[in-house]
Amino acid sequence: MCVCLALIATAVGMAAASDQQVASFSHVAAVFLPQAQSPLLFVGRIAEVNSGRIDCTVDNYRDVTYSVSTVLFGFAPSGQAKVAYLGCAKSDEPRSYTGDVLVLATFYGPKLWGSRRELVLPATPANLLRAQSLLNTDLKKRISRYMRHHDPPRHNNRVVVFEGTVRDLVPHMQQPIACKQQMQFPINYDVEQVLHGDWTDKRMVVHFGSCFNLPDPPIRAGQRMIVFAYVSRSQSEVYGELNLLFTPEQLAQVKDAVGLR
């Protein structure tokens, strides 16, 4: 009887801890996603942890390398992803789960993403559904804000949403610049299908503003993606939004967020 009670107590404690982790994930993700550039959600396993001593300064981080098995949202290279966790203490690392984990992160720079320790959970079906629901909600909010800010009748620009492929090599700055004004990078696309707006050409040049080189992924030659952009009536040029680039696999989610069937 005592053994049974102990097992029940252990199971209840584990369930409570799991519920607390999911609640923490939801709370932190709600703050994290609106500030995230090119959110990434993937399933993988911890391959390597930088667990050495780190000096405690403002911008130090501890990185974890994951072997990526499935990308559920966003762009990521196949194979591995290195994710940085801000902080210098071991407690800033994500929990050391032994099986498949679900990781929510944001693009930091070439071959580097950033996250929070609370945004790593066991990759259970329930956790995957919860994370995807949060991302879909954030996606709808992002797109709604973009449409309100650029589309008629409030504005003179017109929004074009299309699925296309990057045609040429992506231009890069030769050296870093002081970011007083964003550089404009023109990217040539083959337009596969127009999802929203008025555009008849099979080609489009989209200008992206950045103080740094454009993120890779997703902007690389041959990459297919869904692009949100607006056509400036005053300059007759097209300007894209780096935070609204999506994989073709997210077409149904984008259509739902835009209100398309």
Image (cartoon, helix red, strand yellow):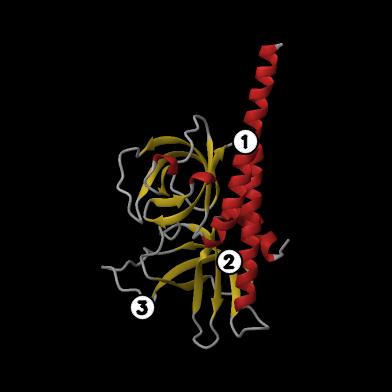
Is mark 3 in CB contact (under 8 Å) with mark 2?
no
Residue where numbered disc 2 is placed: 162
Q: Is residue 68 above or below residue 201?
A: above
**In terms of secondary structure, where does tag 1 sit?**
helix
Q: Is residue 217 visible?
A: no
**In terms of secondary structure, where does tag 3 sit?**
loop
Residue 143: x percent and y percent? 62, 66
Residue 30: x percent and y percent? 60, 55
Q: Is residue 153 above or below residue 175?
A: below
Other residues around mark 3 within 10 Å, as few (<14) / some (14–19) / many (≥20): few
Residue 62: x percent and y percent? 37, 45
Q: CA distance from mark 3 to mark 2?
A: 31 Å
Residue where numbered disc 3 is placed: 180
Residue where numbered disc 1 is placed: 18
Q: CA distance from mark 3 to mark 1?
A: 46 Å
With 25 as the anchor, is 108 left or right in this view? Answer: left
With 16 as the anchor, is 113 left or right in this view? Answer: left
Q: Earlier in the sequence, mark 3 or mark 2?
A: 2
Q: Earlier in the sequence, mark 1 or mark 2?
A: 1
Residue at 38% in and 37% down? 49
Is mark 1 in CB contact (under 8 Å) with mark 2?
no
Say which of marks 1 and 2 sits in front: 1
Say which of marks 3 and 2 sits in front: 3
Residue 54 image-quadrant placement:
top left
Question: In the depicted view, which residue is nearer to us: 55 or 40?
Answer: 55
Task: Give, as a three-letter code, the residue at label 2.
Answer: Phe
With 191 as the anchor, is 109 left or right in this view? Answer: left
